[in-house]
Amino acid sequence: MSPFSVLLFLLQLCCLQMMLVSMPTCMLPGKVVKETHEQLRDLGRQIPTHCQEPNSEIHLPDSALNATSTTHDQCHWTSLVVYECLRGAGLIFAEYELPEGEGGVTWSEQKLDVYLNLQDRLVEDHQCLNTAEASGVLSPYFKNVTAVIDQQDGSACGWEILRSDLLRVLRITLHRDRKCFNWTRAH
Ligand SMILES: *[C@@H]1O[C@H](CO)[C@@H](O)[C@H](O)[C@H]1NC(C)=O
Ligand SMILES: *[C@@H]1O[C@H](CO)[C@@H](O)[C@H](O)[C@H]1NC(C)=O
Ligand SMILES: *[C@@H]1O[C@H](CO)[C@@H](O)[C@H](O)[C@H]1NC(C)=O
């Protein structure tokens, strides 16, 4: 081998290693995300019909779930979007009080607590998925839903819409992008 081809070989080896190191290995744990979805689903009834119609334009666009840029493969984008949805919801839960009593939400407090613990743990443990890109794509949605939650009347609908949209994102991604989650059990 000429010195030049040895050099070329070494360069390739080095390049391959860099690719392996920079590959996204941060994945959300499938079992935990699945349980998060179940708790959120079971904590109340389906979204009331009166909340659906006038606010239908604020629903999370399906297109947000599809990778559009070539910098992410579909799996990585799914992880980023699911993470951002949980993070965005976490911020709203931290900042606003759930309306109780008449005209409020009638969610199971116990299931809500379990859900919030799971959500916070996922957000806390996977900060490697926190990106300005996904946050930018979802921020118009969160702005709109927050505006409804912030209203004196109709706040309950805002919360129902948030829950219903989160459920949809989790349901679609767990089903469509099953392989994008980490199903290895923790020890
Ligand atoms: C947010 O609200 C604005 C104004 O009502 C609307 O034009 C826009 O489509 C909404 N975006 C989302 C993602 O809900
Ligand atoms: C998203 O991609 C799926 C295929 O993976 C396709 O069936 C669907 O129509 C796409 N949705 C949007 C809104 O682009
Ligand atoms: C998948 O989960 C297992 C168990 O928690 C963990 O050891 C492993 O690092 C995870 N893999 C990725 C790619 O996140």
Image (cartoon, rainbow, N blue to C red):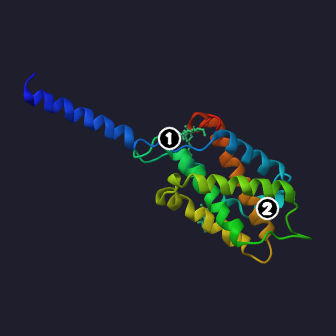
Which residue does the numbered mark 1 point to in the structure image? 74
Camera-side residue: 36 or 4?
Answer: 4
User: Who's the residue at 32% across and 41% down the image?
Assistant: 18
Q: Is residue 42 left or right of residue 11?
A: right
User: Who's the residue at 69% across and 44% down the image?
Assistant: 32
How many discs appear? 2
Secondary structure of residue under mark 2? helix
- Image position, residue 172 (x, y; %): 66, 42
User: Who's the residue at 19% across and 29% down the image?
Assistant: 9
- Image position, residue 115 (x, y; %): 76, 54
Instruction: Give neighbour class at mark 2: few <14, some 14-19, many 20+ (Cα, 10 Å).
Output: some
Q: Is residue 136 left or right of residue 49?
A: left
Camera-side residue: 43 or 182?
Answer: 182
Q: What is the number of the mark on residue 51?
A: 2
- Image position, residue 125 (x, y; %): 59, 52
Q: Is residue 49 left or right of residue 137?
A: right
